[in-house]
Amino acid sequence: MMKLSRRAALRGLGAAVALPFLDCMYPAFAAPLVKKALTPNRMAFLYVPNGIVSMPDWIPAGGLGSTPLGELPRFTRALMPYRSDVMILSGLTSNGGRAQGDGGGDHARAGAAYLTGVHPKWTAGKDIHAGISMDQIGATALAGQTRFASLELGCEEGLQGGNCDNGYSCAYSNSLSWRTPTTPIPPETRPRAEFERLFGAVDDEKDPARRERWQSYQKSILDIVLSDAQSLKQTLGGSDRRKLDEYLSSIRDIETRIQTVERNNRVNVPVTAPDASVPLDFADHSHLMFDLMILAFQTDQTRIITGLLALEQSPRNYPEIGISEGHHGLTHHSGDKEKIEKVAQINEFHIKQFTYLLDKLKATKDGDGTLLDHSMIVYGSGLADGNGHRHENLPTVLAGRGCGTLRPGRHVKFADETPITNLHLSMLDRMGVPVDTFADSTGRLEGLSDL
């Protein structure tokens, strides 16, 4: 069996398809501990807006410290099949999201402070200022180890200028990641554009081959690299051939779904294909973005991803579950039981989409385990009670084993007002990026593992 580089790719006219981690990429006769050391850790943050309508329906039983996960309450009940794969954390606070004398604007501050830990400057002008987000600290430190230092994905398009929340710029609500304190990174919401970014190799739009490919998205990118794929298969062992076939089938599936959306949207494909690839259905859209995330991790094109599932103050309705009113408006329910129930259904619907990602991560082989074993995936929000704009006791799920550095299957309750930036420090440690302090951090979180 031949030895293959971890950076190897299938190539064809105008395309480069990165490969997943195959057995032939390990050094010859590598011991299990060596193989384990070569497996990268990944981290991702999935953000849902507008808080949770009732935190007692989110937090499982258990006092201060660690409690094994048993029966889960209503809003986290969808995680029951994954109890051994997730931790539910409570007691974490984002103090940077609080008013601190600036009055209204909790939604903008919640989004801006979630990964920066910084209270953003109150402005709707160009002089925005927050902080460098923890994902970008990790991305900078790991730059060069992967093709992309980080990926920023989303499922709802937002403005990056203007006044979105009581004098706060829309940039604060609509970006999780901040490259510098004045440079937010808008998320990519278009599946076609992200797919092309991951697998397109030619950047010159004047190139005839690229123009030809953009003229018809009905041709699979796999057809372009078919010859290279067939040649590679002949050199692989049985296990690697199966892995490669499963991986290429996943790519074909994503392509087919994007093409179906584009046909259904009935637009002029060569001109507006990336926009046309956005499904109207939230579940379809989030699943496509999750699958692209998995491909990026599986091929080690990046180890850091943020996903903004919807914007703070999102007006999105959810006809898929029979809700025609906008999400944000419903969260300010004034005690109306019908509105409260509708927000509860949205909260449940969101976390059910998260279970789709957990399923796929758990089913995707990676080295001596799965992608879920070798990842840290945070699902949460910068608000707890969306009606009261509470920034303490944030809803937080931490999934995965972080290459053996996390011990899931528990509810871990921290002391009130524990900064969420302590979680950020702890995760950066596990990514091999130790940082002394970050924003308002007071130390590392105890109890995430046996280490």
Image (cartoon, helix red, strand yellow):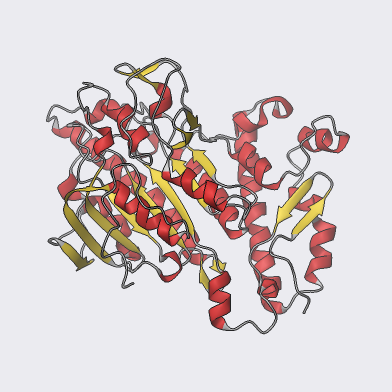
Q: Residue at x 43, y 38 (%)?
A: 132
Q: Quadrant of the C terminus?
A: bottom left
Q: Tell whether 296 sits left or right of 72.
A: right
- Decide: is 21 above or below 275: below
- Decide: is 29 above or below 202: below
Q: Residue most toward the right?
A: 208
Picture coordinates of residue 391, whole percent (x, y) = 22, 38
Q: Residue most toward the front?
A: 436
Q: Tell whether 8 sits left or right of 191.
A: right
Query: Could you tell me if residue 350 is visible in this image?
Result: yes
**Could you say which quadrant of the image residue 109 lies in?**
top left
Picture coordinates of residue 25, whole percent (x, y) = 69, 71
Q: Tell whether 245 sits left or right of 165.
A: right
Task: Using the image as rendered, state which of residue 267 and residue 215 is in the foreground.
Answer: 215
Task: Using the image as rendered, state which of residue 108 and residue 199 is in the foreground.
Answer: 108
**Could you say which quadrant of the image residue 345 lies in?**
top left
Picture coordinates of residue 60, whole percent (x, y) = 19, 58
Q: Residue at x 31, y 34 (%)?
A: 110
Q: Tell whether 299 sits left or right of 429.
A: right
Q: Residue at x 85, y 59 (%)?
A: 227
**Could you say which quadrant of the image residue 234 lies in?**
bottom right
Query: Could you tell me if residue 283 is visible in this image?
Result: no
Q: Residue at x 14, y 34 (%)?
A: 337
Instruction: Report the label total.
Output: 0
Q: Quadrant of the N terminus?
A: bottom right
Task: Using the image as rendered, state which of residue 103 and residue 174 is in the foreground.
Answer: 103
- Decide: is 271 above or below 185: above
Picture coordinates of residue 441, whole percent (x, y) = 29, 47
Task: Using the image as rendered, state which of residue 214 and residue 99 is in the foreground.
Answer: 99
